[in-house]
Amino acid sequence: GKEGWVLTDVAAHNPSAEADYVSALQQVQGVNFPLLAELKANKDASIEAVMNILRLEENLAKRLGLNESQPHAD
């Protein structure tokens, strides 16, 4: 892509780009993100509760190559 372009520049180059952008944005807005929904539902929860929500299940962590030997951010 062209660095520094804005949507109006792209639309001038490709007339359907703006419609494609709006369509893609509407599709993303319709996607259900369960993690975000759970975080919003717990917005007033303690830090500990939020951290527990964000913890990866053990099987998923293994598939992602994460393990206990990696340094923690705390």
Image: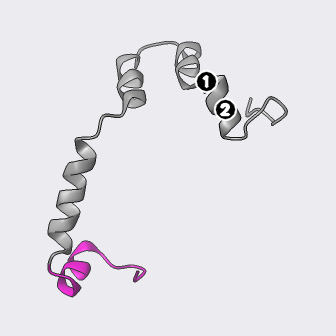
Q: Quadrant of the C terminus?
A: top right
**Left or right side of 29 for 5:** right
Q: Between residue 46 and residue 1, name the one nearer to us.
A: 1
For this orientation, the residue located farthest to the right is 69
Q: Between residue 73 and residue 28, name the one nearer to us.
A: 28
Residue 72 magenta:
no
Residue at image point 24% right, 57% down: 24
Q: Between residue 12 and residue 17, name the one nearer to us.
A: 17
For the residues labelled 2 and 1, say whether their Cβ atoms are less than 8 Å apart: yes
Label 2, secondary structure: give it: helix
For this orientation, the residue located farthest to the bottom is 13
**Left or right side of 1 for 60:** right
Q: Magenta span covers which residues?
A: 1-15
Residue at image point 43% right, 80% down: 3
Q: Position of residue 10 (x, y in %)?
A: 25, 80
Q: Quadrant of residue 64?
A: top right
**Amino acid residing under circle 2:** Ala
Q: Which residue is mark 2?
A: 61
| Coloring applied to the structure | one colour
Q: Position of residue 7 (x, y in %)?
A: 25, 73
Q: Quadrant of the N terminus?
A: bottom left
Label 1, secondary structure: give it: loop
Q: Position of residue 22 (x, y in %)?
A: 18, 60
* Mark 2 neighbour density, 10 Å: few (under 14) some (14–19) many (20 or more): few
Q: Is residue 34 above or below residue 12?
A: above
Q: Position of residue 56 (x, y in %)?
A: 60, 27
Numbered label attached to residue 29: none
Q: Is residue 60 above or below residue 5?
A: above
**Amino acid residing under circle 1:** Glu
Q: Which residue is mark 1?
A: 57
How many callouts does the rendering have? 2
